[in-house]
Image (cartoon, rainbow, N blue to C red):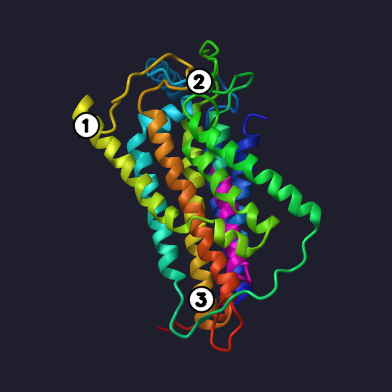
Amino acid sequence: MRVYAYLVAVFVLLVGAFGIVRSRNLVHAVVCLSIAQSGTYVMLLAVGYQSRATPPVFGSPATKPSKSTVEPLVQAMTLTDIVVSATVTALLLAVAVQVHKRHGTVDPNELAALRG
Amino acid sequence: MTRSARIAMFLVAGGCVAALLVLGVLDLPHFGSAVHPYRDASLAAAVAHKTSNVISSINFDLRALDTLGEETILLASVIGVTVLLRPADDEEEHRPVGEGRLLDSTRMVGYLFLPITVMIGLLTVAHGAVTPGGGFQGGVVVGTGIHLLYVAGSYRALERARPVGAAELGEAVGAGAFACMGIAGALAAGSFLGDVLPLGAFGDLFSSGSVLLLSVAVGVEVASAVVVLLAQFLHQAVEVTGDGKESA
């Protein structure tokens, strides 16, 4: 149990990378990249988890701040991570649309030659 | 490189990476352990700044400069997508023909949830400093909520109601407001993005100094970014055709 969550993160990262390698479609590759990046969310949240702790939000009206919460720093970094992932996905999908316009295909295996 | 060679190469390299990562995580502090030095430091800082959502306190107070960078990444990405997806010379735009058939129940649920979703999004932005949520989360809810019009109604209805011009403006205003808050903090409090507002009482809606305003600035920017991005992609999907090629 003590490293199980970390191993899940490693697994998700590698499965995403494997998906990119055997991809036959650029959109599929972009989705696989998102999956690989999801591994980092799992890793960050797992690092910050504490058994029987409360969330680091004290609400309105405020409950008394307790010392025993899960790590808020990694949660904030996960939020940053998700935003970066969304921007990268949007840009890559736009590139995929352009590739389809210029080359008539979205299969990375058929995109052998560089063309201006 | 052939496909099978590439996969074989990945299996070797991926195996090495997997071994390294597993060796690495074996030495991490145990999952669920109680030792979190950053938690202790950021909790104390959040309580001192009267911010009851510690995550917002980190994003918009302790690491506010990083959030400014993050917001700039988002702005750059929206500009990049807009540039990449502008119609080329050899493409024609055409009005979409036919609206398709839609179940009445889908239409009803869509129109019912449109105001509710947008309202929840606005609430999430406004209470970002107090309860779970904040500018990023609420902005996404508002931005995508508007697109329920596309699901429930039609592309035309979305086109009429969707404020793309305002969103392009909001994109710039959100990013600019964040930077201006930073400069105001530098002038008033002596540090970039320093608190310029009274801190208020712990847990109140108007507490936590600048966190609320920064959260709203980010909310405006993110909602605008979602509207502009989806407008670009929907425009490609529905309205643009190339010369002789299938539309992208």
**Mark 2 and mark 3: Cα distance apart in space:** 49 Å
Q: Position of residue B122 (x, y in %)?
A: 53, 37
Disc number lying in front (3 or 1): 1
> Badge 1 is on which residue?
B186
Range of magenta residues: A20-40
Mark closest to the chain's N terminus, 2 or 1: 2
Q: Is residue B60 above or below residue A26?
A: above
Q: Is residue B91 above or below residue B41?
A: below
**Residue A68 image label:** none
User: Quick one: B243 or B114, which is closer to the camera?
Assistant: B114
Question: Can you tell which quarter of the image residue B158 is in?
Answer: bottom right
Pick the quarter of the image with the C terminus of chain B: bottom right
Mark 2 and mark 3 on one chain: no
> Residue drawn 39% across and 16% down?
B200
The residue type indicated by label 2 comes to: Val
- In the rendered image, the residue lying farthest to the bottom is B244
Answer whether labels 3 and 1 touch (C-beta < 8 Å): no
User: Quick one: B193 or B180, which is closer to the camera?
Assistant: B180
Q: Is residue B146 above or below residue A91?
A: above
Disc 3 chain ID: A
**Mark 3 and mark 1: Cα distance apart in space:** 45 Å
Residue A90 lies in magenta, yes or no?
Answer: no
Q: Is residue B12 above or below residue A59?
A: below
> Badge 2 is on which residue?
B35
Q: Position of residue B91 (x, y in %)?
A: 50, 82
User: Quick one: B245 or A33, which is closer to the camera?
Assistant: B245
Disc 1 chain ID: B
> Badge 3 is on which residue?
A99
**Mark 2 and mark 1: Cα distance apart in space:** 35 Å
Q: Position of residue A66 (x, y in %)?
A: 53, 12
